[in-house]
Amino acid sequence: MDAAHQKPNTEKRYSLIAEIDPPKGVDLAGFLDTALKVRGRVDNVRVTDSEHAIMRMSPIAPCLALIDKAIEPIMIITGRDRNRISFQADLLSAAALGIKKIVVKEGHDPAEGDQPVARTSGDLDLVSMLQCVAALNSGKDLAGESLDGATDFEIGVSMELSDDVNFNRERAEFVLQLEEYGVTSVTLGPTYDINIVEQFVPFAEKTGIKLYSSLMFLKSVTMIRYLNNLAGTPSIPQEFLKLAGGADCPNFWISLTGRQQ
């Protein structure tokens, strides 16, 4: 076929998703202001769930506020602070309020957050959370009891990465199991080594699951040093530390490009 008459390829291979933290308080004005500023500039808005174990408002109310502004939210939900009863209960509440898209995440260790004496529930890992969601989508709870109305979630999974090669390889291979739970996308935590991301690509391609990498803005030398001191977190190269240290202004940001397969 002549190139001039070929139908243009309009399929979009890349998406830009913004994650916004709920307020640490009851005032949603700042949260909504940020969401409205990025509307039209990003493809989706995700609402975090006490990210980095820093206590904030539960994501359900901010998601509902976004729906009221005609912005379809994606709600992140972690298993760190919930047992399987409260996890299922929160998902049913979210579905009843019109939240259709979720991202399941294990959640950071409370020792990293602002209330380090907190304990995790210890009841849920990634597999058990996915079993919960798959059950609710099928019209039953995790105990096999029928629901008075099933959920219909589009399911994503968020995976943290590590500087442990074996850990990352096991996570990449785990992608093959996600298809049976109806997972449509996997988001990888921030990394500064593209080779780590590349490990996940063949497994995502085999299953048809969308693969997203994360972009993190490094705001200061202090932030870089803090992240480098977190156990298991992928290391930030010294070159970025030097760039941040040599910046002329305290609001200097380093952006690292993310990739979506």
Image (cartoon, rainbow, N blue to C red):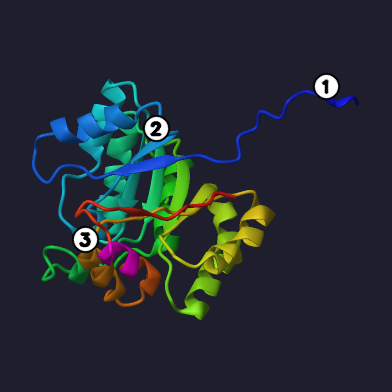
Q: Which residues are magenta?
A: 242-246
Would you say residue 6 sits in the magenta stretch? no
Badge number at residue 200: none
Local secondary structure at mark 2: loop
Label 2 sits on residue = 149
The numbered mark, 1 or 2, whose residue comes first in the sequence reads 1
Q: Crowding at label 3, few (<14), some or many (≥20) Cα neighbours within 10 Å?
A: many
The numbered mark, 3 or 1, whose residue comes first in the sequence reads 1
Q: Residue 16: x, y in percent?
A: 46, 40
The amino acid on which the numbered mark 1 sits, given as a three-letter code, is Ala
> What is the spatial separation of the Cα atoms under label 3 and label 1, in whole angstroms?
54 Å
The numbered mark, 2 or 3, whose residue comes first in the sequence reads 3
Picture quarter with the N terminus: top right
Q: Residue 239: x, y in percent?
A: 39, 70
Whether residue 146 is visible, yes or no, is: no
Image depth: mark 1 or mark 2 in front: 1
At 29% from the left edge and 47% from the top edge, which residue is drawn? 48
Q: Residue 118: x, y in percent?
A: 13, 67
> What is the spatial separation of the Cα atoms under label 2 and label 3, in whole angstroms?
32 Å
Residue 11 or residue 152, whichever sits in front:
11
Label 1 sits on residue = 4
At 43% from the left edge and 54% from the top edge, which residue is drawn? 214
| 53 vs 149: above or below | below
Local secondary structure at mark 1: helix
Could you tell whether 6 is left or right of 110 in the image?
Answer: right
Label 3 sits on residue = 53
> What is the spatial separation of the Cα atoms under label 1 and label 2, in whole angstroms?
52 Å
Residue 56 or residue 16, whichever sits in front:
16
Q: Crowding at label 1, few (<14), some or many (≥20) Cα neighbours within 10 Å?
A: few
Could you tell whether 222 is left or right of 212 in the image?
Answer: left
Residue 130 or residue 106, whichever sits in front:
106
Image depth: mark 2 or mark 3 in front: 3
